[in-house]
Image (spheres, rainbow, N blue to C red):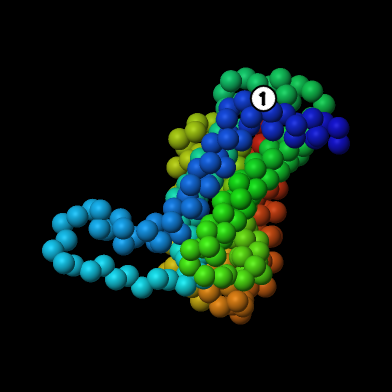
Amino acid sequence: MNSFFMLFQKEWTESWRDGKLLWLPVILILLGLIQPLSLYYMPQIIDMAGNLPEGAVIDIPRPRGEEVMASTLSQFGTVGTAIFVFSVMGSIAHERNQGALSLVMARPVSPLQYIGSKWLQQVLLVLVSFAVSYGLAFYYTNLLFGKVEIDRFLFSLFVYSIWIVFVMSVTMFFGALFRHIGGIAGMSISFIAFVSLAGSLFPRFTEWMPDKAKSQAGYFIMHGSWDHAFGWMVFSSSGIVLLLFMCTVFVFKRYESY
């Protein structure tokens, strides 16, 4: 257990040294604020862009707060997913390619402790950054558009976090499987895109997949209630994340020399 906490502390130290503790929250905060602020100032943005007929009046209906929050989640579903992948894809590969992994594993450290410390630190960092970003979007949405119930915000935050943990677990798995950053990023994004595409093409047969966490979070923001497949999605997604974690440890253990 002491080895795990030492590794966990090491991950936070490295995140501070490489600047991830700063740039990751900043990028996610900017991403979360873009949607409410751009929607609020859209008439001024269009007016400043010019090329409008003289005397034209810009009248854009103001969206409800729930609609703004749902569109903010959709922003995280596209650009945000890529950021989540990029933030974790080199966590194992860098140490393996630089030879630092051999020094770590020469100590009394098990593969489970090594992978577990990385997974937990990466997930905590991203989820806290996402919560701050989404919380600021919630604040400005209430300030500029209208009140959104706090329970809708909290429950959608929790459900969308399932998708984030799934994305990071997939990336961590391919990080243990491949040595090159390009291969890790390519395979992770391709696999995640395949899951999302399958969910779009066969919605009736993929209600249990982690991809549905995105739509479930948006559904709750808009309606204040869960879709009928919510419980099944949470249960199966938790099992998939656990399976991915176990596969990551297994793949990592297969390397005879680190």
Amino acid type, residue under disc 1 in the picture: Leu
The percent position of residue 6, horizontal first and vertical second, equals: 79, 30
Determine whether the residue tagged by mark 1 lies in a helix, strand or loop: helix
Quadrant containing the N terminus in the rendered view:
top right
Up/down of 208 relative to 160, above or below? below
Q: Is residue 110 above or below residue 211?
A: above
Q: Is residue 13 visible?
A: yes
Relative to 231, 69 lies left or right:
left
- The answer to whether residue 82 is above or below residue 7 is below
Q: Nearer the viewer, residue 6 or 103?
A: 6
Residue 44's x, y, as percent? 31, 58
Which picture quadrant has residue 107? top right
Quadrant position of residue 226 = bottom right
Residue occupying the point 57% across, 67% down = 217
Identify whether 101 is placed above or below 233. above
Q: Residue at x 58, y 73 (%)?
A: 220
x and y percent of residue 179 in the render? Answer: 54, 31
Q: Disc 1 designates what residue?
A: 101
Question: For residue 252, which quarter of the picture?
Answer: top right
Depth check: 8 or 20 in front? 20
The residue nearer to you, when weighing 193 against 36, is 36
Nearest the eye: 219 or 53: 53
Question: Hey, which residue is sitting farthest front in the picture?
Answer: 55
Which percent across, then down, holds residue 52?
A: 16, 61
